């Protein structure tokens, strides 16, 4: 099943549940009139350009990995994300938001919040790796590991994020079932994008062995925004560090990302 009808079905189901909740119960979810990211009960998204949220890793007081010759991860990720933004906007096919566009520190949950509040269609966190083995080099792509799913569920509840499915939260297994459905759908989209991305990076840059990896990284935990974390290469490797310092190499990688985004959305539009 393609994703749009799927989301519509979930929304209809949830709007039904929502309508059944008495006003006093509803107000609990909107206490203090804080504009929580109120995601799924909102009207169906008007058809508009897909929104891509780019997340340059680290920043400000957090430099991330530091290369043998002093190149800081936050510098690489900021440059790459800004370059990718320009490439994407030049196509006229996407809206692009950065979680930060200068050397500032942004908390992890705010990075996810930016994507969720704006109902992003895709979230890409950009990083550069580091390891003790100085010969290890190459790019890799991470998606959410299965074992992180419960963590994602806990975060949804603890941060008062109003997922459609939360409205049924206290009732019963139906709520859990809908949470799982939404999360599984998001995960399969993330996996699909990761596969496309790796196939386009291959040939443009060296990939590390086992290049599609799964982890419980915090920025991948949004239950309703397809997300990947791209590691551009290893700063702990002198050759990767040298390459990542050059705009030409970063551009080559970012063009592969742009191409992957084109493919991903052309596939999802065809099936939707
Ligand atoms: Zn990083």
Image (spheres, rainbow, N blue to C red):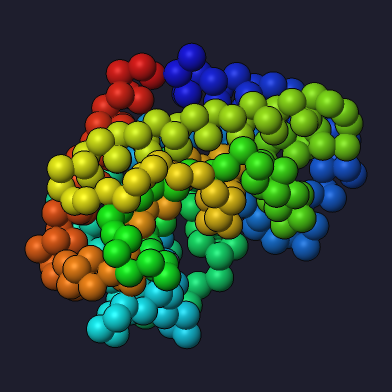
Residue in the image at 49% along x and 29% along y: 188
Give the answer, above or below, for where 15 lies relative to 49.
Answer: above
Q: Which of 116/44 is in front?
A: 116
The image quarter containing residue 8 is top right
Residue in the image at 25% along x and 83% along y: 69
Residue in the image at 70% along x and 49% along y: 151
* The furthest residue to the top: 1
Give the answer, above or below, for where 155 lies relative to 210.
Answer: below
Residue 43 position within the rendered picture, expressed as x and y whole percent measured from the top left: 56, 34
Q: How many marks?
A: 0
Q: Which of 16/222 is in front?
A: 222
Quadrant where the C terminus sits is top left
Residue 150 position within the rendered picture, expressed as x and y whole percent measured from the top left: 72, 43
Horizontally, is 160 left or right of 95 in the view?
right
Q: Is residue 160 visible?
A: no
Horizontally, is 81 left or right of 56 in the view?
left
The image quarter containing residue 74 is bottom left
Residue 260 position within the rendered picture, expressed as x and y whole percent measured from the top left: 25, 39
Q: Which of 124/100 is in front?
A: 124
Horizontally, is 25 left or right of 148 in the view?
right
Give the answer, above or below, for where 62 lies relative to 138.
Answer: below
């Amino acid at each position: 099943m393609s994703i749009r009808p799927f989301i519509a079905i979930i929304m209809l189901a949830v709007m039904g549940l929502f309508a059944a909740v008495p006003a006093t119960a509803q107000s609990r979810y909107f206490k203090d009139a804080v504009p929580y990211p109120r995601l799924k009960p909102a009207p169906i998204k008007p058809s508009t350009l897909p929104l891509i949220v780019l997340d340059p890793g680290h920043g400000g007081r957090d430099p991330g990995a530091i290369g043998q010759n002093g190149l800081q991860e936050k510098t690489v990720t900021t440059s790459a994300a800004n370059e990718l933004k320009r490439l994407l906007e030049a196509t006229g096919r996407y809206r692009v938001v950065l979680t930060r566009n200068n050397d500032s520190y942004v908390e992890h949950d705010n990075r996810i919040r930016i994507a969720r509040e704006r109902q992003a269609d895709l979230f890409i966190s950009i990083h550069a790796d580091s390891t003790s083995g100085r010969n290890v080099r190459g790019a890799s792509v991470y998606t959410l590991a299965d074992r992180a799913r419960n963590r994602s569920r806990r975060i949804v509840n603890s941060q008062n994020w109003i997922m459609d499915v939360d409205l049924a939260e206290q009732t019963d297994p139906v709520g859990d079932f809908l949470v799982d459905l939404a999360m599984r759908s998001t995960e399969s989209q993330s996996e699909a994008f990761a596969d496309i991305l790796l196939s386009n990076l291959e040939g443009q840059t060296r990939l590390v062995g086992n290049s599609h990896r799964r982890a419980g990284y915090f920025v991948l935990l949004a239950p309703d925004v397809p997300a990947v974390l791209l590691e551009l290469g290893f700063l702990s490797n002198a050759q990767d560090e040298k390459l990542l310092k050059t705009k030409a190499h970063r551009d080559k990688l970012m063009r592969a990302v742009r191409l992957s985004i084109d493919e991903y959305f052309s596939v999802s539009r065809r099936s939707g």
